[in-house]
Amino acid sequence: MYAFLEAFRAALTSLMAHRMRSFLTTLGILIGTASVIAVVSLVQGFSASISNQFADLGGSTMNLRAENNNENFRTGRINFITFKDLDVLRYRVPGVDQVTPMMQVAVAGTSYRGRTSSPQVLATTAEFQAVRGRYPERGRFLAPSDDQGRRRVVVIGTQVIDDLKLPENPVGEYIRIGNEWFKVVGVMQRQGELLGFSQDNYVVIPFDVGRAMSGNNTQPFMSVSFNVPDISQVEVVRERVKRAIRASRKLKPGQDDDFRVEAADSFVKQFEQVTGTATAVVAGVVSISLLVGGIGIMNIMLVSVTERTREIGILKALGATRRDILVQFLLEAGLLALLGGLIGIVLGYAAGVGVASVIPNFPPAQVPVWVVVAAAGFSALVGVVFGIMPASKAASLDPIEALRYE
């Protein structure tokens, strides 16, 4: 341990004696590490923002929707989720709770006192808020009696208030949706933006009212969301739902499903996989500059060995072993790379924060701890790997020949 500490002190002293050369030597590592950290911080910040936006949709929330491809639309054989499927899901599948159908209603737009906007019109039931984890911040949400009585009531997103210039508390006001008037009974909590698009530009009306506005004789494009109270049973319930819906739709054995049952957070998981792969690929490409920096360290260390040949001869004459010389030069190379890596981490994070702040509506940069540790460790590893040749050359010098070197 004493020999190692002495070698560390000698390596540090040597680097401090040639500050400018040490800085220029480590510049390649610094730039490479800064580039990696900047790219990773932007990608991770973007990924974290997406995950936070969908944080309310846990793995226990699932969706049932029809599966269609270009062939279905071309031939007109379009698949729908039917009300029979909805009843099967509600009453015949154990482990399913809080089932809510949802459909988008095509209308000409909404209006209020001469002002118009075009929000998404969503028809659903009272269970929606429990299934999707969205609740009103003013007023109330839809009640079962609203659907049963086909009341013209509506719950609106905060973007609609801004677009229609509604009062700050619009509960009790009437807005026009399509050709019908609806009473505002609630305002949903603000969700903010996702990928640059507002998540608050929507209105929610009772499901049966939406069916009536779409035409009761028309098969609606609807999906069904439901909860699985026991999250450990998600996959079991998924298989139950598939079997029940296949039976409901009279699909024969071997016939492909014309529907899909998926977790509500599947988009987030797929997005995280994509961003993880993208981060690895981009970081790998940018890391090539670290190898270039390592070659620079190797070149300077070889020059340093030549310059310090007499010093090495004196150390060996005083009893320094081959191992002592090897450790000292390896520590110098490792310290050079680690120093560049640490400075690069700081500069890279600062660059990521700066770029994120310049781009409008871009989420703040984030750097996970494991990335910092990996960057610093990889930088030091590069220094050690590329320092092996110079260190081995220094350790192999003959002490007599080294002392004679001019």
Image (cartoon, grey):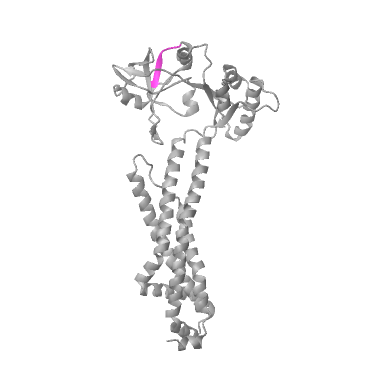
Q: Residue at x 67, y 26 (%)?
A: 255
Which one is in front, 204 or 291?
291
Q: Which residues are magenta?
A: 150-155
- As displayed, is residue 269 above or below residue 168? below
Looking at the rendered structure, the number of numbered marks drawn on it comes to 0
x, y percentage for residue 100?
Answer: 52, 22
- As displayed, is residue 345 above or below residue 391? above
Residue sticking out furthest to the front: 74
Residue 404 sits inside the magenta stretch = no
Visible residue check, residue 67: no
Quarter holding residue 177: top left
Which one is in front, 102 or 189?
102
- As displayed, is residue 74 above or below residue 329? above
- As displayed, is residue 393 above or below residue 375? below
In-image side of 22 versus 244 (left or right): left
Which one is in front, 178 or 94?
178
Q: Residue at x 62, y 33 (%)?
A: 235
Visible residue check, residue 174: yes
In-image side of 58 versus 190 (left or right): right
x, y percentage for residue 144?
Answer: 48, 16
Residue sticking out furthest to the right: 253
In-image side of 301 versus 68 (left or right): left
x, y percentage for residue 127?
Answer: 49, 22
Task: Point out the image quarter for the C terminus.
Answer: bottom left
Q: Residue at x 49, y 54 (%)?
A: 284
Which one is in front, 162 or 298?
298
x, y percentage for residue 206?
Answer: 45, 17
Quarter holding residue 190: top left
